[in-house]
Image: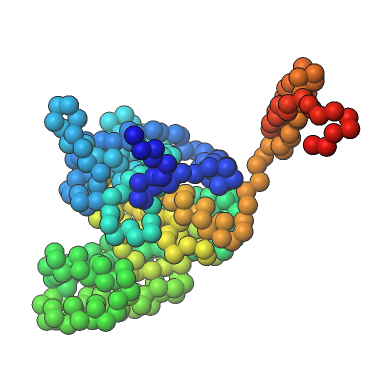
Amino acid sequence: MQKILHTPEGVRDLYSRECEQKRLLQERILTVIRSFGYHGIETPTFEYFDVFGADIGTTPSKDLYKFFDREGNTLALRPDFTPSVARAAAKYFLPANEPVRLTYLGNTFVNSSEYRGRMKENTNLGAELIGDGSVDADAEVIALVIRSLLAAGLENFQISIGHAGYFKALAEAADLEPQEVDELRRLCSNKNTFGVEKLLSATAGRGNMEATEALKKLPRMFGGVEILQEAAVSCTNPDAVQALNRLRDIYEILKFYHVERYVSFDLGMLNGYSYYTGIVFRGYTFGTGDTIVKGGRYDHLLGYFGKEAPAVGFVTVTDQLLLALMRQKIELEPGQERRIIRYQDATRKEAIEEAEALRAEGYAVELIHEAEDTYGPDEQK
């Protein structure tokens, strides 16, 4: 049988220095998440297919790794943690008098041919705040994201925030068809101003003209907090105004966390997952073209599993964050100082005793056994 040493397309081995850096990164972020009162949860690597079905609004079926169990049930490797955590929360935690804070770490799997050059298996580390629909919960999660990235060693990054409700309100007022909404969402996400203009010009006169004009501006509506004021000047739609006010309130609360300088706004940013109902956000930094963190509010997702509850959360795309750190030449130093002790048969006892003593003091110690010198005193090695 031929020996297979390489991995399938889209997955890879991680070892030595890179593997160590990744684990140190995860430890740093988890430490910050736990400091905000979040508790660990593990969900299965695969679930029933319906947990990630079209009604949920997660990854398209064609991009899932699907298979069958012995009973003929369709199963899927998780492409996204949030539906799994929502299912578990609906089963074990709700209803409750207090919000539930959960954190997770594991791999996700997306079998997409569009992921050219990207991995199909990625490590996700995230947190979900369930049972709290307040603006304070939104601000807490964004502040937690920023604190996590700072703990990772990043200094130059930006969290861009939008609102799914703003786009939805304008699209409904403009009387767009479902397929038009999907296409407009794609065009806005790609900042395709020409495409947005062309699509909306074809629908002119059908719905509210103010909403149509506001939609045309979406690809250009990004920047500092002043963008919210600019959008509010020509917008009277109640739901859209409410979304803008929510974003402004979040910004004011983030000032209390002293992290507002890391925040910008993008009203044309629309997450690919349609289960988001409120704020959506992404994190960017130098060294990678992909997002290093993403998340948002999903107030109806738990309802698919039988228990309505508001929720907001985020996920750190650990592999992309690690890539950015490496390209920015930011190295994570282990908390333990390392020592190497070399010994031969005659000094085995002393070497082990020394290693054990150092480990008790908090050092990481590597023992290396060396063969006895077989050369004579006048021989060269």
Give 35 or 62, whichever is nearer the viewer.
62
Q: Quadrant of residue 187?
A: bottom left
Question: Is 283 positioned to the left or the right of 211 in the image?
Answer: right
Q: Quadrant of the C terminus?
A: top right
The residue at 35%/46% (across/down) is: 8
- When the figure is inspected, residue 354 is found, relative to residue 364, above or below; the finding is above
Q: Position of residue 258 (x, y in %)?
A: 57, 58
- When the figure is inspected, residue 201 is found, relative to residue 11, above or below; the finding is below
- The answer to whether residue 359 shows anywhere in this view is no
Q: Quadrant of residue 354?
A: top right
Question: Is 298 positioned to the left or the right of 26 in the image?
Answer: left
Q: How is the image coloured?
A: rainbow
Give 344 or 117, whichever is nearer the viewer.
344
Question: Is 317 positioned to the left or the right of 54 in the image?
Answer: right
Q: Position of residue 223 (x, y in %)?
A: 44, 73
The residue at 68%/37% (across/down) is: 336
Residue lying furthest front: 379
- The answer to whether residue 77 shows anywhere in this view is yes
The residue at 44%/55% (across/down) is: 293
- When the figure is inspected, residue 235 is found, relative to residue 279, above or below; the finding is below
